[in-house]
Image (cartoon, rainbow, N blue to C red):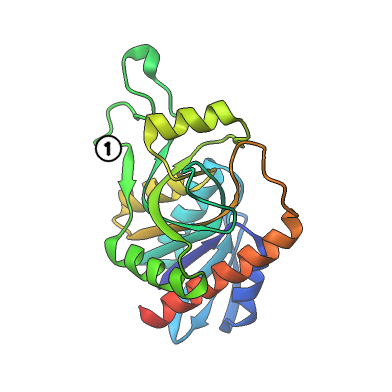
Amino acid sequence: MIGIIGAMQEEIDLLLANLQDAVEMNRSGIRYHIGTLHGRKVAICKSGVGKVNAAIYTQVMIDRFEVNKIIFTGVAGALDPELNIGDIVVSSGAQQHDMDVTALGFPPGVIPYEQTSEWLADAELVQLAKEAGEKAAPGRVKIGKVLSGDQFVADREKVRQLRETFGGACTEMEGAAVAQACALNGIPYVVIRSMSDKADGSASVNFAEFTVEASNRSYAIVDEMLKAL
């Protein structure tokens, strides 16, 4: 079974509209939808905001529905200056940028006593996501590191710091938690993010209109990936 976690209700609705043999289940206060898409058994849910929610949703999905792959989609703020609004980042890996134990001598972003603090995405899923993304938005897909933190970044200095310290392509609030939960369980994952802004407060975009566009694009990418898997 393939797990699909969406950050936006709009993209979840598009997936559910095409879900066959749909069954709704509530687990740990979370609503999951089980069914088939293109003959593939899938479990779909909408993520909560922030890393704790994302980790819980992911772990429940793994434990209760025994998914063997997880695809996470949503929006993010661009850190890479070459990225524009509407561009897509496919995760090469993910890391928590707000993990800070520097007072005890650990580098920024490092989780003490863990073997790694950056969790690499599955190479096959990354390639499938890139190919699907190029069909949905030709020339607008980049593979890069996703940074996650329980912060909405909207400051130019913070953008510069995150880019220089971690080499991140974009910043959001859930991906690294999904990645860590998947890594601990041996589950392949990929995060796919559409850029909603430049993460510096400078973008002028009708977010309601953008959400519809990003949701349609996310759905198209996931749909194409399921066909190819």
The residue furthest left is: 115
Viewer can see residue 33: no
Location of residue 47 in the rendering, given as x and y in whole percent from the top left corner: 58, 55
Q: Is residue 89 above or below residue 51?
A: below
Task: Reply above or below: 104 against 57.
Answer: above
Q: Residue at x 28, y 56 (%)?
A: 186
Q: Nearer the viewer, residue 88 or 109?
A: 88
Residue 46: % across, % down: 60, 60
Residue furthest to the top: 103
Q: Nearer the viewer, residue 136 or 148?
A: 136
Q: Secondary structure at mark 1?
A: loop
In the image, what residue occupies the spot 28% across and 61% down? Answer: 123
* Residue that carries the numbered disc 1 in the rendered image: 116
Q: Residue 143 at x, y = what percent? A: 38, 55
- Left or right: where does residue 111 sit relative to residue 204? left
Indicate the quadrant containing the N terminus: top left, top right, bottom left or bottom right: bottom left
Query: Is 32 left or right of 142, judged from the image as shown?
Result: right
Give the residue at x 24% y 36%.
Answer: 115
Up-down relation of residue 204 to residue 150 (above or below): below
Total numbered badges shown on the rendered structure: 1
Q: Amino acid at mark 1?
A: Thr
Work out whether residue 105 can be spotted: yes
Q: Residue at left 38%, top 50%?
A: 144
Quadrant housing residue 20: bottom right
Instruction: Specify the quadrant that holds the C terminus.
Output: bottom left
